[in-house]
Amino acid sequence: MSLKDHFCSSPWLHMRINNAGHYEYCRWAKKEQRLSANNIYNITPVEFFQQIMTPIRQDLLAGNLPAGCVQCTQMEQHNKVSGRQRQLLKVGVRLESFEKTLASSPWVPEFAKGGETMQLPQDWQIDLGNFCNGACIFCTPHSSSRLAVEFKKIGLANDLPPPNWTDDPALVQKFVDTLISSPHIQYLHFLGGETIITPAFKTILKALIQSGLHRTATIGFTTNLGIWRDDIVELLKQFQGVNLGMSVESFKSINDYVRYPVCLPTMFETMDRWLTIGKQHGWLMQFRITPTALTVGHMLDIYDHAWSHGIAIESCNFLDKPECLRPTVLPQEYRQPIIANLQNWIDKHVVDNNVVVNIRDPNVAKQQIVQDLQSYVNYLESEQDESWRLLDLVQYLKRLESNRGNSVLTYLPEYEELFRTAGY
């Protein structure tokens, strides 16, 4: 196996802290394989990055594929821009000219240290906790306090998730001190829960501004478009760069079902406010989608809107869990019309070159949109049939509906026969 097949620069510049305060070596790594036994309660971010992550870096230098990295491999198989490609680009390495660009990368001296490093992260994903006003059906209790309460009520979970690390002001201050003392901080991406209503988000933004990091660091965050905060917007305006992710699955009513209880009128109103502010201040804006078996056939209106407004679409990876919501749960006879419809859209939206790595470049937004949609065509065409999970899907939806008082058939009447045969 050549170094090109698996090498990734991410562990030399990036790490993550999850909602419970566990450190993880990558934002894209498969959840079960993120080295999450180490926590901000008992080890510093510096110790984790410089010491605990060393074996991951050594594995990559040896040309091996760490167990958690399979999701990037899957993305690349379907010509979807992977986290690996994005991180390689940050150190000047491109897969199409790997050997040449690796040799000229300014990071070669760091790679030559055999996996050891005295660097500090320049790129963070900061999961603030599960405090959330939404209960998306593809989410988990660890990322939604509302879903956590619901899951326990209807018997899908026995216990509530552990406390959020950001509930402890001392831990937040400890983390902020690490950021402020880290040279070369480039990018901080915040997730929740719902980021803008999580108290620690405001606390950290204010601390970064007070320290002067707002002049050099770019802030990224994702919002579910179900709420607006003027005070947060005023803080964000002070940063030299803001990457705004807007979570939405469809502009049709099925969005109300999967992103319960956020409804379309609220979503559209909030989205328009973000788009207006973003354009005024030159923010990078993207639609963040999570295609599922319920929405993969109803997302082209988002691509239409993105195309006409020059806004990129970023779906971080192909949905892994809940397994029953993967688009591959749809039988082939349901997949094929969707594939044809998506491909027809691609054929009508011609771009000069649909090979894009830097999805943060607004100048290639249209190429990125086409490439992203093509990856879902490739995925639906080649991934194995998992229609045997339909029974699990129907049971899962029925449990949620027993508490929410709605019905998937109201939103997807075309799936009635399919769902009835699976026990709906």
Image: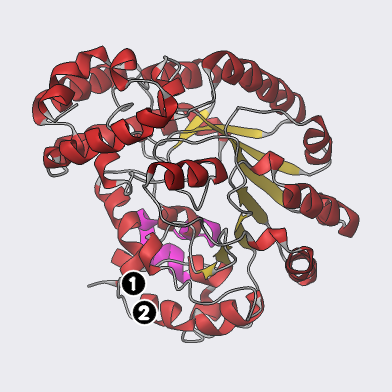
Residue at 73% from the left image edge and 68% from the top image edge: 171
Does the magenta segment cover residue 246? no
Q: Which residue is mark 1?
A: 66
Indicate the quadrant containing the N terminus: top left, top right, bottom left or bottom right.
bottom left
Residue at 83% from the left image edge and 35% from the top image edge: 231
Question: Label 1 vs label 2: CA separation?
Answer: 7 Å
Report the disc number at residue 50: none
Does the magenta segment cover residue 97? yes
Q: Are marks 1 and 2 in contact (CB under 8 Å)?
A: yes
Compared to residue 111, the image places residue 295 above or below, namely above
Q: Is residue 157 left or right of residue 385?
A: right
- Whole-percent x and y of residue 285? 60, 32
Judging depth in this view, the residue of 388 and 181 nearest the camera is: 388
Judging depth in this view, the residue of 113 and 207 nearest the camera is: 207
Q: Main secondary structure of the magenta part?
A: helix
Residue 106 appears in which quarter of the rendering? bottom right
Residue 235 appears in which quarter of the rendering? top right
Residue at 56% from the left image edge and 46% from the top image edge: 145
Q: Residue type at mark 1?
A: Pro
Compared to residue 47, the image places residue 416 above or below, namely above
Residue 302 appears in which quarter of the rendering? top left
Q: Residue type at mark 2?
A: Asp
Residue at 48% from the left image edge and 49% from the top image edge: 141
Compared to residue 239, the image places residue 350 above or below, namely above
* Circle 1 or circle 2, nearest the eye: 1
User: How many numbered discs sit on the rendered protein?
Assistant: 2
State whether residue 139 appears in this view: no
- Whole-percent x and y of residue 69? 35, 63
Report the disc number at residue 59: 2
- Whole-percent x and y of residue 27? 49, 58
Compared to residue 395, the image places residue 12 above or below, namely below
